[in-house]
């Protein structure tokens, strides 16, 4: 059974640009959630999608957005990149109901220069 | 007050000994509780998941949950050098959201 796949693995972008990250969940999983991990702030929740609907959102500015497609694949977009957006971006896949496990992908390492 | 608290460590454990990790959380509505292991430069790997009060054992790992005390712990028996990593406690306070502690670094010494 394939795991959670995130692409690309590494990205270098310039301040002011925008970026799109992709996440393919485990087959049969309908929930995809996104997290930002930095040395200073740890793992922070960005948002979660379930059956193409955003069900939950963290405390990030509107520059961070996402969507989910009918096949459960999800994308995250960051516009007007800032240096502080440099981080490891992780997505987690789950069945989306209470009492189910969440599995992470390998992450996308974003560097903003 | 942080919503999920863990001792940052490092927790130094002799090889073959038991490592004991603790986590407290503030949101009483949390339903599910997770322990992830993260090696440096890698993504978190799920090692234990618990949602009922009591103990849950899986191989060398035992998770303990006490919802009344808002406390969850992880025991690693017969610690091996390969267990050296950061252990992240996570709780599920609402749909699809995991709230993480800062992590406890475990160092297993031969």
Image: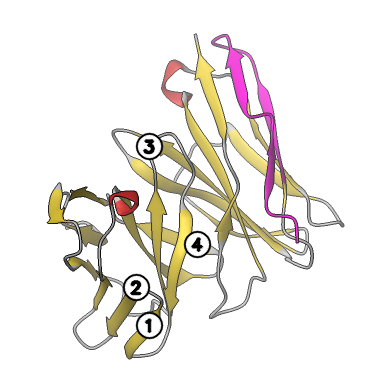
Query: Gap in Å between the C-alphas at discs 3 and 2?
Result: 21 Å
Mark 3 surroundings: few (<14), some (14-19) or many (≥20) residues within 10 A: few
Q: In the image, is residue A20 above or below residue B18?
A: above
- Going from the N terminus, do you reach mark 3 or mark 1 first? 3
Q: Residue at x 44, y 16 (%)?
A: A83
- Report the label total: 4
Q: Which residue is mark 4?
A: B97
Q: Which residue is mark 1?
A: B57
Circles 3, 2 touching at the beta carbon (< 8 Å): no
Chain of the residue under the numbered disc 3 shown in the image: B
Circles 2, 1 touching at the beta carbon (< 8 Å): yes
Query: Gap in Å between the C-alphas at discs 2 and 4?
Result: 24 Å
Nearer mark to the viewer, of 1 and 4 = 1
Q: Which residue is mark 2?
A: B61
In this rendering, do the residues under marks 3 and 2 share a single chain? yes
Query: Gap in Å between the C-alphas at discs 3 and 1?
Result: 26 Å
- Going from the N terminus, do you reach mark 3 or mark 2 first? 3
Based on the displayed image, in which of its 4 quarters is residue B100 positioned? bottom left
The image position of residue A4, as x and y in percent, is: 67, 51
Query: Gap in Å between the C-alphas at discs 2 and 1?
Result: 6 Å
Nearer mark to the viewer, of 4 and 3 = 3
Q: Residue furthest right?
A: A70
């Amino acid at each position: 059974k394939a795991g959670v796949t995130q692409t690309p693995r590494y990205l270098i972008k310039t301040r002011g640009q925008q970026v799109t990250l992709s996440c393919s969940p485990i087959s049969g999983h309908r929930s995809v959630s996104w997290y930002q991990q930095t040395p200073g702030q740890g793992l922070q929740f960005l948002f979660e999608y379930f059956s193409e609907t955003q069900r939950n959102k963290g405390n990030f500015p509107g520059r961070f957005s996402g969507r989910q497609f009918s096949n459960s694949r999800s994308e995250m977009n960051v516009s007007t990149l800032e240096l502080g957006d440099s981080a490891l971006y992780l997505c987690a896949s789950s069945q989306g109901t209470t009492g189910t496990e969440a599995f992470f992908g390998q992450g996308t390492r974003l560097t903003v220069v | 007050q942080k919503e999920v608290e863990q001792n940052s460590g490092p927790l130094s454990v002799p090889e073959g000994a038991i490592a004991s990790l603790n986590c407290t959380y503030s949101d009483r509505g949390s339903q599910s509780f997770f322990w992830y292991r993260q090696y440096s430069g890698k993504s978190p790997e799920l090692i234990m998941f618990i949602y009922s009060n009591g103990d849950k054992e899986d191989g060398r790992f035992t998770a303990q949950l006490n919802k009344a005390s808002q406390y969850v712990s992880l025991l690693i028996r017969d610690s091996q050098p390969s267990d050296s990593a950061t252990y992240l406690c996570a709780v599920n306070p609402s749909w699809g959201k995991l709230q993480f502690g800062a992590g406890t670094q475990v160092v297993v010494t031969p």
